[in-house]
Image: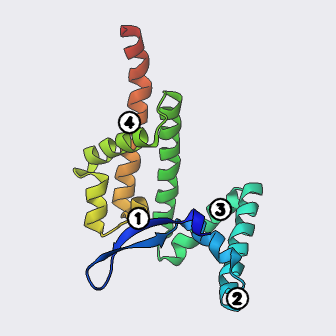
Amino acid sequence: MATNCSQLKLKAVDGKSYLADVADAEQLLRLIQSISSPRAEPFKLWLAKVGYERIQDMNDPSLSVDRARGFWKSAGRSEKWIQQRMMGQETRNKLTDYWSESGVEKPSEFALLTNIIHQEWSGVSIKAHKTIKGLKTQNLRDHMSEAELIFTALAELSTRQTAIFTLPTARLLR
């Protein structure tokens, strides 16, 4: 496993920086699989459960939608919020499909376009919005209010609709 780990200089309690082994999530899960200890067993059972759920999701994708709804419900989200979040995701998917068909390929391009749309409706960048909400790696949309979800979906829908109507005109002008 050590060959799959990288090393980063991390600051220790004494204030000095030392090289430390680091791994990404996939490497850590593989490491857990290789541990032969009763203390690792709960993690292995969890991995087996998640793996089984993923196989089920591939056979019936609606199960993952139901799982997401259940997660949001357990996090205290209202049915209205969950519905808005799911409708917003559908709007987002249609927009990104349109962008893909129009030649957008790189994740950085999707991120740039998304940030422009977000900044236009909210007045702040996605990064700034996450900072305001105290988020680091979490999905911003999962922490939006009902109004923010509506504004995001409306901005993405209007972007796609505008692009669909203006792109043919732009091509004719070339």
Report how far apart the C-alphas of labels 4 and 1 lie in the structure.
26 Å
Report how far apart the C-alphas of labels 1 and 3 lie in the structure.
21 Å
Eye-nearest disc, 1 or 2: 2
| Residue positioned 22% across, 50% down in the render | 123
| Residue positioned 37% across, 63% down in the render | 144
Q: Residue under circle 2?
A: 37
40 w.r.t. 10: above or below: below
Eye-nearest disc, 4 or 1: 1
What's the amino acid at mark 3? Ser
Q: Residue under circle 1?
A: 137
Based on the displayed image, in which of its 4 quarters is residue 16 positioned?
Answer: bottom left
Check disc 2: other Cα within 10 Å, few if <14, some if 14-19, many if 20+: few
Question: Regarding mark 1 in the picture, which secondary structure is present there?
Answer: loop
Report how far apart the C-alphas of labels 3 and 4 lie in the structure.
28 Å
174 w.r.t. 124: above or below: above
What's the amino acid at mark 4? Thr
Query: Which of disc 2 and disc 1 is earlier in sequence?
Result: 2
Report how far apart the C-alphas of labels 1 and 2 lie in the structure.
31 Å
Report how far apart the C-alphas of labels 4 and 2 lie in the structure.
54 Å
What's the amino acid at mark 1? Thr
Q: In this view of the protein, which residue sits in the foreground, 116 or 12?
A: 12
Q: Is residue 152 left or right of residue 32?
A: left
Based on the displayed image, in which of its 4 quarters is residue 39 positioned?
Answer: bottom right
Can you see residue 68? no
Report how far apart the C-alphas of labels 3 and 2 lie in the structure.
31 Å
Q: Residue under circle 4?
A: 159
From the top left corner, tell me how far across and down residue 152 is, in percent.
37, 50
Query: Which of disc 3 and disc 1 is earlier in sequence?
Result: 3
Q: Residue under circle 3?
A: 64
